[in-house]
Image (cartoon, rainbow, N blue to C red):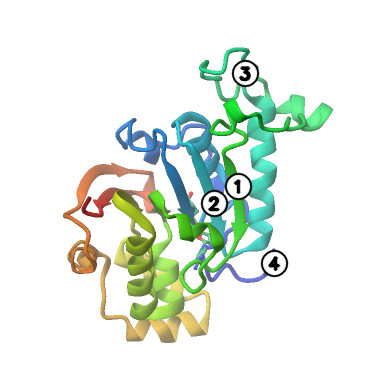
Amino acid sequence: MSANSTPIHGNYHGYYAKRPTVKDPRLSLLPPELFRGTSVLDVGCNEGWVTCEIAQSWGARKVLGVDIDDTLTRLAWKRKRTVWSTQEPTTAIDEKPLPGYFPASFEHTFGPLPVPSAQTEDKHLFPHNISFRTADWTNTTIPQDAAGYDVVVAFSLTKWIHLNGGDDALLRFFRRVYDVLTPGGSLVLEPQAWETYAKAKRMDNRLRENAKTLKLRPDGFESLLQEVGFGPAQHMGTTGEGGFRRPIDIYKKPA
Ligand SMILES: C[S@@+](CC[C@H](N)C(=O)[O-])C[C@H]1O[C@@H](n2cnc3c(N)ncnc32)[C@H](O)[C@@H]1O
């Protein structure tokens, strides 16, 4: 997918220039233990900012970011180098490094720090615990799915799956998330409101036509997810400014 084509998948380039933050407020709404020691899939990872934060600061054992847009996945690998290059150097394995310790200008001037090879004792720590890959995750299985994930993150994604593939694609996505989650695992969902579909569909004729066929609504996702097998939503709160003001919900797969 070229960097200049219409972002019909929400594959915005420079997305985090609009949501600039080292600490993502959406993650701050979550219980600190949610990611600890877990394997995480971040679907629609864009340039990997949220993915890197989960891997660096939330104690996840293994994190995979997936995006449909290859240019964004490449930028996510680059983001990993930046986050690594600016984090505080630590000596003890159990010491938590401070993110953003060195100014970004260091990397601009001297280039990124090389990532050392992983040792057995730090394989589960940033930057060794994170990877990215390009895939349309609604429609393709990736090799990592086979082992399952303890947490699947889907931030600002459902509208794009819904507008591109209709109700069927959205339902397929929710079913796939359920299938790849380990028992007791969590889906962390940030759905976009129905009102925001109007602007998005204007971007492309196919999206406009697809939108006419949609029967499912974001207000109904909670009951839809329960039909798929999840427990009731845990509403963690709402965050974001203006059009980015959205709820964060956790859905658990029964243990
Ligand atoms: C609006 S951005 C949200 C980025 C990030 N999740 C966040 O909230 O900070 C949506 C992302 O989902 C990706 N995406 C859309 N459909 C996808 C699919 N079927 N599989 C993988 N990624 C997808 C887009 O390329 C885009 O980067």
In the drawing, does residue 145 fall left or right of residue 107? Answer: left
Secondary-structure class at tag 4: loop
Badge 4 density bin: few <14, some 14–19, many ≥20, Cα 10 Å: few
Badge 2 density bin: few <14, some 14–19, many ≥20, Cα 10 Å: many
Per the image, the residue denoted by label 2 is 65
Secondary-structure class at tag 2: strand
Among the two numbered marks 2 and 3 on one chain, the one whose residue lies closer to the N terminus: 2
Q: In the depicted view, which residue is nearer to us: 206 or 59?
A: 59
x then y, percent, for residue 22:
52, 32
x then y, percent, for residue 202:
47, 76
Which amino acid type corresponds to the residue marked 2 in the rendered image?
A: Gly
Which amino acid type corresponds to the residue marked 4 in the rendered image?
A: Asn
Per the image, the residue denoted by label 1 is 131
In the drawing, does residue 163 fall left or right of residue 105? Answer: left
Q: Are marks 2 and 1 in contact (CB under 8 Å)?
A: yes
Marks 4 and 2, how far apart in space? 22 Å
Q: Are marks 2 and 3 in contact (CB under 8 Å)?
A: no
x then y, percent, for residue 17:
58, 45
Which amino acid type corresponds to the residue marked 3 in the rendered image?
A: Glu
Per the image, the residue denoted by label 4 is 4
Q: Say which mark, if any, is on residue 88.
A: 3
Q: Kindly identify the residue that appears in the image at 63 percent across and 48 percent down.
A: 76
